[in-house]
Image (tube, rainbow, N blue to C red):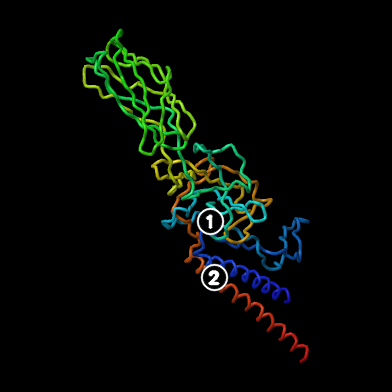
Amino acid sequence: MLQAMFNGVSAISATQTDMNVIGNNISNVDTTAFKGSQVSFSSQLSQTVQGASAPTNGGGTTNPIQVGLGVKIGSISVQEAQGGLESTGNPTDMAIQGNGYFMTASPSGGTNYQRDGHFAIDSSGELVDANTGDPVLGYTANANGVIQSQDTITPASTLSVPVGSLTTAQATSSITYAGNLDAASTSSSSYTQAATVYDSEGNAQGVTLTFTPDATNPNTWDWSAAGTTLTTGTTMAAPTGTTNQGTITFNSSGKETSSTGTLALTSTTANPSNVTLNFGGATQLAQTSSLAPSTQDGYPTGTLESFTVGASGIITGVFSNGESLNLGQLAMANFSNPAGLSSIGNNQYSMTNVSGVAQISTANSTGMGAISAGYLEQSNVDLATELTNMIVTERSFQANTKVVSTTDDMLNDLIQMKQG
């Protein structure tokens, strides 16, 4: 009889734990990237009153006679289903669609993992968790915007997005020309075309090229360069000698076949630089001369104004000069058993012995999900399911309290029998 009471007590304890889990799920229905949990029950050890027996003397077998000793919590497992995405319009908010976790540096010097992508830029320009201030980890980019993907991710692998303070400039190293040089021109005539190039400090420099038909070869044009003084007062000087002159050779059909010469430019404020001229788009036809620069790879100084984050987690800075440059790429981690991670609060997790070692990579690669900037992942808790589970758990609790109270009544009757 007492065993029946103990069974009821074990069930009451188990249903209380179940209600705690359900209550926690419901309370976090609006928590970013929260993953609900589910309780599973298992039976306690059974007491064997009589064991199973084999047939004897032509008789039959007998099954074991066992009395269960109640119920216990078998496990509380995290449901890893994807939560829905909610648009926030904030470029630093990020959601993962698929597998993986963001990585952040903990104050203790370790690494934490989270699905919550509610990030912000702090006063030093670092990308951080908006809730905790922990730096977000990833791969940095060099001065040319090349992601250093070969680096090892450590708690020091922070990402910097210094809007308003980062500047960029690139010296011109090549200019491509396209257009025509008039085949009817004579060596006594020439054609000039100005170009703007940039030194290593981003200063605009004016260079004028003069094109003249060669006096001895009708399919060759000579060119020479001269510098100009800009309104800023910066001078790009073309040194004397053969470095700032060359030739362009055409075939009988007027197509460019070869060219010589390189611009050797100096500046009063920046380092000297050489500029390669590409005349592959030039023609020599009996038409008005129109040869002019079509592209060049230099650009003036620009200040970082904004940034975007792509599906692979690459952070691209947009500068005031119209240029874009990669600033870094978020790192992501995945685990053989994500349910084995330990929740440490603040929507963060830490690695455990059963979660497996973090497999570090980037979004949209090696089984990792994609990143959606301007969105946050919602909780995956189904409120209707949780409310239904709450009702079932409540009824189970009530039924088991009835077992306890009924057993108590039986014991009381037994005591009354003795007194009688």
* Residue 388 locus on image (x, y percent): 50, 68
Q: Is residue 8 above or below residue 44?
A: below
Q: Is residue 234 above or below residue 107?
A: above
- Decide which of 75, 403 is in the foreground and name it: 75
* Residue 299 locus on image (x, y percent): 41, 36
Q: Residues within 10 Å of mark 2 (few under 14, many from 20)?
A: some
Q: Which residue is mark 2?
A: 392
**Residue occupying the far bottom of the picture:** 420
- Decide which of 410, 158 is in the foreground and name it: 158
- Decide which of 123, 20 is in the foreground and name it: 123
The dot on residue 18 is: none
Q: Which residue is mark 1?
A: 123
Check disc 1 and report its element: helix, strand or loop: loop
* Residue 413 locus on image (x, y percent): 71, 86
Whether residue 94 sits left or right of residue 56 in the image: it is left
Tell me the residue at 45%/38% (across/down): 169
Check disc 2 and report its element: helix, strand or loop: helix
Question: Which residue type carries mark 2?
Answer: Val
Whether residue 213 sits left or right of residue 106 in the image: it is left
